[in-house]
Image (tube, grey):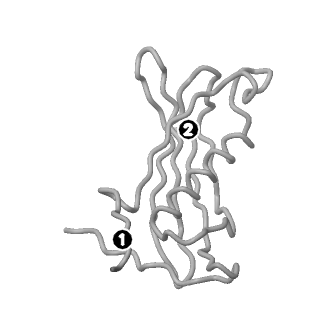
Amino acid sequence: MNPPMPSLPSSATETRMVDMVFPDQATHYGVLFGGQALRMMDMSAFITASRYTRPNVVTASSERVDFHIPVRQGQLVELVGRVVSTGRTSLTVEVEMFAEELLTGARALCTRGRFIMVALDEHHKSTPVPPLAPEPT
């Protein structure tokens, strides 16, 4: 008997995560440290890539990351990671970070960046990833 295949989420190419900015993540100005934002975004890229490929993945590089507006202490942060392209053993995940006011729901795009992830086999060698299916038209 074959083991059951894992079922894919409704959108295997997208992951959404929500977090909150607490005082230990903020500068003395009350805004999220850039390094904390990058950590959250890299984690989102890792989870997105892992769900898409299922083998282990590591961050190979990050491309341009643009900080549009600051995220304030006490705001919610929604991270939306999307697989936007694949290579033979790598995939590119775009991550958008939105700030949301907890009480009003007002939202704004704060940060956007791309992360290149590489899939690894059990010997820590790069391994092929599934090709990205074209968007239905």
Q: Nearer the viewer, residue 127 or 20?
A: 127
Label 2 neighbourhood size at 10 Å, few (<14), some (14-19), many (20+)? Answer: some
Which residue is depicted at the point 73% across and 27% down? 26
Residue 107 x %, y % = 44, 29
What amino acid is labelled 2 in the image? Cys
Give the quadrant of residue 110: top right
**Kind of element beneath mark 1:** loop
Number of labels in the image equals 2
Rendered-image quadrant of the C terminus: bottom left
Residue 117 x %, y % = 60, 68
Residue 30 x %, y % = 71, 21
User: Extreme top residue here?
Assistant: 103
What amino acid is labelled 1 in the image? Met
Residue 82 x %, y % = 45, 58
Q: Nearer the viewer, residue 31 or 67?
A: 31
Label 1 neighbourhood size at 10 Å, few (<14), some (14-19), many (20+)? Answer: few
Q: Identify the disc placed on residue 110.
A: 2
Q: Which residue is mark 1?
A: 5
Disc nearer the start of the sequence (2/1):
1
**Kind of element beneath mark 2:** strand
